[in-house]
Every structure is written in C-alpha cells, then in structure tokens.
Image (tube, coloured by chain):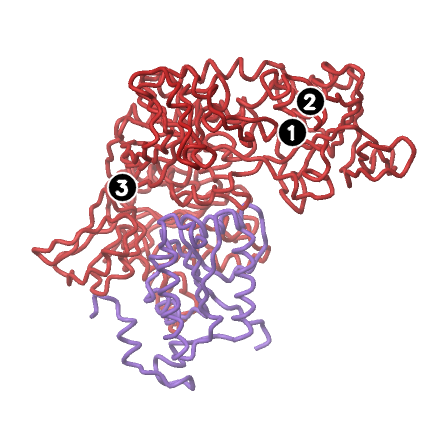
Chain colours: A purple, B red
Amino acid sequence: MSEQFKPVIVGFLCNWCSYRAADLAGTSRIKYAPNMRPIRVMCSGRVDPQFVLKALKEGADGVLIAGCHPGECHYVEGNIKALRRFSLLKRLLSQWGIEDERVQLVWASASEGNVLAAAVDRMTEQVRALGPLRWQESVLSGNGHGHPAPIETIAEVLATPEEV
Amino acid sequence: MSEKVGVYICHCGTNIAKTVDVVEVARWAGVQANVEVACEYKFMCSSLGQTLIEEDIKEKGLTRVVVASCSPHMHEKTFRTACERGGLNPFMFEMANIREHDSWITDDGEAATQKAKALVKAAVDRVVHHQPLELLPVEINPNTLVVGGGIAGISAALELANAGYHVYLVEREPTIGGHMAQLDKTFPTLDCSACILTPRMVEVGQHQNITLLTWSEVEAVDGYLGNFTVTVRKKARYVDERYCTGCGICIEKCPRKVIDEVFEAGLSYRKAIYRPFPQAVPKYPVLDPPNCTYFERGKCKACQIFCPTTPNSIDFEQQDEILKLQVGNIILATGYTLFDCSRIPQYGYGRLANVFTSLEFERMVNAAGPTGGKIVLRDMKTPPMSVGIVHCVGSRDENFHKYCSKVCCMYSLKFAHLIHERLPDAEVFNFYIDMRTPGKGYEEFYHRLLDEETHFIRGKVADVTDAARLPGEEGKLIIQVEDTLIGKQRRIPVDMVVLSPAMEARHDSREITQLFRMGCDFDGFFIERHPKLDPVATMTEGIYVAGACQGPKDIPDSVAHGAAASARVAGLIARGIVMMEPVRASINKELCSGCRICNNLCPYNAIVFHEDQKVSEVITALCQGCGTCVAACPSAAITGAHFTNDQIFSEIEGILWDVQSDHWEREAELVTAK
C-alpha cells in the first residue's frame, strides 16, 4: 500500500465540555487530524461499553471518549463513572488483543479546544503506527489471522439488548 | 421502516464550501437509504434556507430532516423551529456538524468531504430512529438567590426587588459593599465611592423584598431551574440581630485590638467585636472568637456588660444556623481577589516597607481610612516626595496571568491624580506596558493626567530595590526599567512604590463551580453561556453570573452585568413556566429487575425504588438527562430519550459507513437500487 493509512477514530464527546472543546477548536481554526468522527452524548457517563465495542466491530480503528475534567462534570460525576467503566473495559479489550492506544479517554473542558485537538492528533498518529484494526474480519468472524478470541462471549457482549 | 428524510447541506458562505465538496456530499446523500431529497444551499440558517425545509416537509411529505452545517449549539434550535413550522415534531431533526468539526479543522478537501459524508450518514441513520418528543413545562419559583453582595450583586438584587420579586442576598463577609466599599474615588469622574455606594447598600438593607443574609455561605445546592433548594450556613455573629440597635458601644468598650487584614488591608486596627466600616449594612457588629478575650480565657464580657439593650444583644452561646431557601434562579456575583504581589519577589512587596499594593493605597487615600486620607510612607507620618506606580503586576504576564485586568490603567491614573492633588510637589511616575483606557471619559482622563505632568514611562519594571548604586539613590527605592520609548535602561529613585496587581478569580472559584454545577475557565473565572451573545447565563439552566467573577470588570460594567442577569431572571419569573428539553431517562417497569444499580449512580437522586413492586422509577422533574443510568442498566430497562441505544448504535454504523467490512457491496446495491 503506497498510500498512507488513514485511521478512522470514533469520538464520543460529552455535550458540555469536550463537544464544545471541539467546537472551539473549529472556531479557533486549530488544524488537527480529520480522522476523528465525533458522536455527541450528553455526558461521558452515557458511553456504554457496548458503544465502544460496536464502533470497533463496525470498522473503527480506535475510539476516543472525551469528557469534562474530574470535578467539572456538568452532571456532577458522570465522568468519574465513565472512568470506572473505561478501566474495566480496558482490561477486557486487552484480553482481546486490542492495543491500549486504540481506546482512549481524555478530559477536555469547553475552553480547551487545543487540548482536544492535540489529543486527536496524538491518537491518530498512535493508531496510524498500529495499523488498521479490522476487528470484524480478523477476529470476530474467526476467519482471519487475528488473536484467538472467545467468539460467543464477544457476540453476546455486542448483541443489542433487543436481541438478547 | 420507510422514512422520508430530507438532507440539507449548508455552504455557510465559503466556511464549509471552501473545504468540503458540498455538491458531491449532497449528490451522494441523495442515493442513501431513506433519503427522499438532498440538496445544498448557501445559507441554511437564512429565512430562505429555513423556508426550503418547511416547503419540502409540506410538499414532499418529509418525515425527518437532517441539516449538515454548523454546531448544534449554534443552530439546532433554529432548525427545530423550522421543522415545527413545517408541521413536523421538532425532535424529528438531526444536525451534522460539518463546520466546527470538519471544514474548519483541516485544509485537506478530500478528507473533509469524506468526513462530511460520514457525519451526514450518521445523522441520517440516527434520525430515522428519532421519536417525537414534547418539551417539559417547569414552574419557576419567583424567589431568587444572589450570591455575593458587591456592587454587581447589589445591582442584581435591587433590580429584581424593585420589579417586585423576592431576593435572598447571601454575603460571606459581615457587610455588603464588596471591594467598592474600600475604594476612595471612582474613575474617571472622581465620585466618592462610598457616596454613591452606601445609599444603594442602605436600600438593600431596608428593601422589603430583600432578605439579607450576611456572614453566611452557601453550603449545598439541590434541584434544577425553577426549583432550587439552597442550604445556607448563617455563621454565628454572637450578636442577636433581633435586639441589637447597632449603637456600637460594644465595639467602643472591647479591649482587644486586632489588625484589620480584610477591610483596611492590614493598615489599621479593628476590635475583636467589630463592624468593618461605620456605614456597614447590616449595622450589627460581628464577634471574632479566635481574637476574643472571653473565648480565649473565659472572662471579659465587656461587650455584654456594656450592651444597653434589653434583652442583651450579645449572645456568647449563639450557634451557626442552617437555612433552607427555595429559589427558582441563582445569580452568582462572587467577585474577585487581588493578585498576591509577593509572588513577584523582585518587586519587593512584603520585603521593602514602602512598596504598597493598590488596595493599601486606596485605603490610605480614603478620607475614612487609616490615615484620614493622608498619603504617607509606612512610618505613617512622612509624605513621599516621589511615587512610582507600576501597572500590570501579574496581568499580561506569561508567568502569571496572560489576560489584561482592564481596570488597573485607569485606577493607576486616578492614583497619580490624587497624589498631584494632595501632594502638589511630589513627582509621579507611571510605568506601563500599554495604556489601556477604553471607556466613556477614560481617554479624556488620561489626557488630563498628561497635562498634570505625570511622568509616563513605557516599559515593564524589572526590579524594585533599596540597594543604592548612584548618587541620589540613598534611602530611596530604585525602580529599574527599560524605557522602551527612548530605548534605554533607567534607574528611577522614588520614595514610594504602588503596585497595581491583577484581578484574579476567587481562590475557591473551582469549589463554587462544583457547588453550583457550572464551569470556570483556566484562570478560574466563571464561563458564560456564550462569550458574545449570552454573557449572563451559564451552561447550567437557572444559574447566572454577574460582575468580576466572570472576568475583570470595572464598576459600570459590573452594575450593567448585574442588572442584565436580573432582567433575564425577571423575564423567566414573569413567564411563570419554562419549557425544558425532554432529554430525560425513563424506566420500563416490565424490564426492570430491581437490581438498584441505577439508584446510587444518579447524582440528582432522581431515581426512586418502589419497594412494593421491586422496580425503580425516574422522577422526570429531577432527571437532568445525563444518561449515566441508561449506560449502567444491565437489563436495558432504562431509555434515555433522544439518546437511545437504537439511535446511537445507528449513528455509529452510519459514521463508519465507509470502513465497514461489507461496505462496497452495500454501496453498489444502493446505487443500482436507486
């Protein structure tokens, strides 16, 4: 492949801090990697681990979760809950062979457009260095050369509630 | 499911169209599933753009609308209203942010166009799962809490009280008045500060619509816009306000003198039972236990013995009181503190006796101050023959605060004028970086000072020292500065140095933001909802800011800001109810397993558990819609309106349309199908 790999990162941004930080980065015309595709949630506490798994399954090379700084959450401590879930999810992900850099949690307040932009730039480079994830092809469908994974468990985790 | 989605791509002039190929995005969107119509337009937010949406809804029978333009924080409301006018539920709309998050962050047109497609696809896939929602009406309690009794808080409280609404004014010091009460003259008119402030203070004290709670602090805030419950600690004053007449005999008889660090900036003394200044409102004194002989040694009680009231007003047994206030809106006017000049050791504050801060100088020139208005050195008797006034101490300084404190140039000019007035023979040097005098009559005041022969030296002061090197420097303070207008280093010997420190956010401003659940910026100043168009509201509904707690301000700006916040609150109270976003959680009782995981997660205690049915329920009025419980529910029994799992999963699929494993096959199918 002569062309440079363009990682796709899904960003879950909280409505009050990090989404506005991204807005501010734009308004301030800060140039950063266009690889992060943002999805707005009201609070980083709304980020269900299923969202992260779903994004990776659908072809994302990385997932960024961004929230308000600890102590500055619009909903008091939703970001702390996000942090707790994130730590647990990370342990799960590492067992599936998903590298640490692919799923990241950052804090960016509404005034920190530069912080968010820098985080996206940094993460894009890290994921670029790791290469494409292709989780669906390499692991979940079981026909690739990927890491051995408990397929049933993953399918269960990924099943939307309606399917359970 | 067959939905008819209308997709509108905005050029935003050239803001979007310059980077994103909007024509291509619109063409491509037109062939996506569920899309009935897709087009691009110069300005979607214009009335013509909105009419386009309205007409398409009516003529083409659209059931959903997607606009790809700027941030939803900018125009979501605009387009929702347009949908509503077209006869669609406003929540059948979704916005794709292809300006702030796309065209403005990259110059790579190809990548930007690709990202725009992903964002549009995400919005289209999401919007088909949207459900019609209704705004929630919330009643507004007509009482308002104003926190902080400086000039901004006073102004806010009086505006509301005069409009006929009840106000609780909470102030943590024993009196209202704030920093303005400490000042001598106000620039540029040279009105006496106390003369214009004290009548307003008295008005607050006597107003039947204002409950004044001084020597009190807010401890907790519960509830939401329209219905806050605020817990206030009214600290023990040891003086019973019911009986005290404010005669002041207790103060006169108190044998204990303490340095007054707060009001007199450490230049003078107060008693252990004291009133910060004679015109304080309320007039009741306050007793300071750590300095009181009775509290220290168990005897004295001079104040109680001499108190002429019956029953006696001095109550050594008084305890803190906890009050619960019910209010609909809260205005924060917590003010500022001054930069600690000793943080710049080379300026010598705290080390060299005759280096003063602006506040100390302000007290000194005040006729009611410690020297009766005489300008003297630290020995309290020698008038200085030369004074150096240093601007921008801690402001406009990479090491401390980058921002300009806005008022220092003007009060430094005022100081120069007052010195000329009181000590006609004294020489005055103003050391400035840039002279900033924007404001009505401010520039004229500067010119007046130029005529008064103040020496203006443009340059940042490097050092203030008492180490004499040249003849004529002995016993003086030498100001070392580069005079940038003549391009030379200069040493200027003076008798007295006045530092003009930065206005800083209150040191506990972060705790305040946590208490009231709103935000502050890097410097600690509270963040307004919009820097241009909404400088009084905050991101939290029902919480407003006024005065210097939002950023450095002079008196007229603070007064205007306070009044503006009040006008906003008065408008809400007059309307009686406010319509709230219906982004709320709800629990499906059939699915709830009664595990109670969600109960403790809710920061608003909005989830109650019904012991009899073994299920949890969300109290809609208390729910703020964060969705933390939704994400945590192991039974998927909780739905977060407008952010349902369905909606977000579809959004994830849409945003990754081009990287899914079966992407090319599906694309081909779609194109042939159309």
**Residue A31 locus on image (x, y percent):** 59, 54
**In what quadrant of the picture does the C terminus of chain A appear?**
bottom left
Q: Determine the residue positioned at 46% across, 52% down.
A: A18
**Residue B282 locus on image (x, y percent):** 40, 20
In the image, B191 versus B34, the foreground residue is B191
Is any atom of residue B652 visible in this view? yes
Mark 1–mark 2 CB contact (< 8 Å): yes
In the image, B547 versus B208, the foreground residue is B208
Report which quarter residue B500 is drawn in. Answer: top right
Residue occupied by mark 2:
B415
Q: Determine the residue positioned at 65% across, 17% down.
A: B373
Circle number at residue B88: 3
- Residue type of the residue flagged with mark 2: Phe
- Residue type of the residue flagged with mark 3: Leu
**Mark 3 or mark 2, which has the lower sequence index?**
3
**Residue B89 locus on image (x, y percent):** 26, 42
Query: Gap in Å between the C-alphas at discs 3 and 2?
Result: 63 Å
Query: Gap in Å between the C-alphas at discs 1 and 3?
Result: 61 Å
Chain letter for mark 1, please: B
- Asked if labels 1 and 3 share a chain, the reply is yes
Mark 3–mark 2 CB contact (< 8 Å): no
Is any atom of residue B663 visible in this view? no
- Residue type of the residue flagged with mark 1: Ser
Element on which disc 3 rests: loop
Front: mark 1 or 3: 1
Q: Residues within 10 Å of mark 3 (few under 14, many from 20)?
A: many
